[in-house]
Amino acid sequence: MLKLPVYMDNNATTRTDPRVVDEMLPYFTEKYGNSASRNHPYGWEAEAAVEEAREQIGALIGASAKEIIFTSGATESNNLALKGAAVMYRKKGTHIITQATEHKAVIDPCKRLEREGFQVTILPVDKYGQVTAEQVRNAITDKTILVSIMAANNEIGSLQPIKQIGKLCKEKGVLFHTDAVQAVGRIAIDVNEMGIDLLSLTAHKLYGPKGIGALYVRKKDPRVRLEPTIDGGGHERGMRSGTLPVPLIVGLGAACDIARREMADEGKRTYRLRERLRKGIMEQLPESYLNGHPDERLPGNANISFAYVEGEGLMMGIKDVAVSSGSACTSASLEPSYVLRALGVGDELAHSSIRFGIGRFTTEEEVDFVIDLVVKEVNRLREMSPLYEMALAGVDLKSVQWAAH
Amino acid sequence: MPYSNAILDHYSNPRNVGSFSQAEPDIGTGLVGAPECGDVMKLQIRVNPLTGLIEDAKFKTFGCGSAIASSSLATEWLKGKTVNEALAIRNTQIVEELALPPVKVHCSVLAEDAIKAAVKNYQDKQTTGAEKELAAVGV
């Protein structure tokens, strides 16, 4: 029997792996020391656990333990990387480069920096949501201090050419930050091979707990320095003060350790399930479109637009599966996903998009259930859709004078 | 977001889904909204020219569950009403009946607009129809 609703929103968050929880539990009730306490065994065992987690995180991304700074999550990691580097290197230059489909946790700090006198270039993306290293090269000026390009997009799953961009940034002597929240634990990431200087990650996207993330800060070639955004006891090499949440850190470490060992097999499995879902749905439903790159995308992500059907309306019909939509019918602006718009997806198709996120715990039975449900509901809603009726009658929807409201 | 049972009922079992031929003289058609806004409603009424009563109503809606429910409810309410009674239906009544959350009030506004547009379309047809008849007899 399936447990309903089927969870298929693994790009939003993931279930904490029970193995991770098992590792965490002793650090709440038995090993509850403050890792900064240097004078007793409680502190020592907490510190040892934190250092082990640093090793585990470093091992997953090819970094050394000393380069890992703990934060509350990826939003804080992104803020610290962008604002911390901008302020620290302000004398060197005031120009930052990023791209249009970044998460708001990158876009909004960039906008704040812009208000504070920095210049920000937001590169446009192609129809798959990708930028090229060449675009970055052309945007770099002698004032550029930082390039921030995500590794994989949270909505459409498209991967960016991180390695080429990293190489270019090395060549140009510009720092390279990547928001790798969706990528870490899902695809292979190596900070040295990819020329990454700053990397944001979070535990809850890789089957760890919410409330803990990390920022990788390169220690040599070059040694990256950051102005802290939170001042206090000088924890984390002075870059991020605050008592370390040891149980969460242990959870992040354990999650990274599992990911490092199982990622290759898991990637193949989630890819296979993703393709089963994508084909199962798209082969049965004409005028359904995959958003994002067909191949260069996260293995478990499928973002599909269903013409003539509104995404939120569809979600109500498929309430037995937990997914998300690019429609923003609930937001005051009524504007659909800025990510899909950046790809040039028309507003009506953006409103019709559903993001499916397959993960570690998704089963084939669940995928088959979701295929049947989606096909049935899209067909039902199309029968109810005036746009579908008009399209069948040969009306060009673009030629209609709509009364926008 | 939790939805009321009334919304879920109209969404799952929408009343009066379908279309009438727009060309017929006793049919009024209202098409409101825009695909880029994520809502399009088509609402149609069939008016008995002798009694002036709306005898039937149908809808098709592209939109969220609240938009579908609002138009479904509107077709139910329209049946048996006079054209003027139809024009008196307010979006706030739809909000109340379906317990629409504040972010979904625009769906009820769209339904009210659709009713008005359908009635106007019907009335326009009657005027032009009458004028045509007058023209035909040479007045």
Image: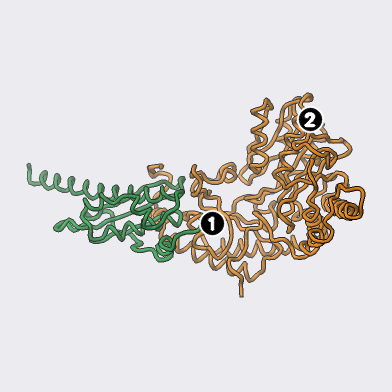
Chain colours: A orange, B green
Q: In what element is the residue under mark 1?
A: strand
Pinpoint the chain carrying mark 2: A
Residue B103 picture location, percent across and down: 46, 48
Q: Secondary structure at mark 2?
A: helix
Kindly identify which residue carries mark 1: A288
Q: Residues within 10 Å of mark 2 (few under 14, many from 20)?
A: some
- Gap in Å between the C-alphas at discs 1 and 2? 47 Å
Which quarter of the picture shows residue A25? bottom right
| Callouts 1 and 2 close, C-beta under 8 Å | no
In screen coordinates, is A361 left or right of A60? left
Q: Nearer the viewer, residue A31 or A378?
A: A31
The vertical placement of A130 against A57, above or below, is: above
Q: Residues within 10 Å of mark 1 (few under 14, many from 20)?
A: many
Q: Position of residue B6 (x, y in %)?
A: 40, 62
> What residue do we see at 37% from left, 57% from top?
B60
| Location of the N terminus of chain A (image quadrant) | bottom right
Farthest bottom residue?
A1
Mark 1: amino acid:
Ser
The reply to whether residue A294 is visible in this rendering is yes
First in sequence, mark 1 or 2: give its number: 2
Say which amino acid is labelled 2. Answer: Met
Residue A391 in view in this figure: no
Quadrant in the picture for the C terminus of chain A: top left
Residue at the outermost front position: A39
Q: Is residue B10 above or below residue A117?
A: below
Horizontal arrangement in the rendering, residue A100 relative to residue A208 (left or right): left
**Where is residue A69 drawn, in percent x and y?**
81, 44
Of A397 and B119, nearer the camera is B119
**Of A306 and B103, which appears nearest the observer?**
B103
Kindly identify which residue carries mark 2: A88
Instruction: Tell me the tag on residue A312.
Output: none
Residue B116 placement (x, y as % from top left): 29, 48
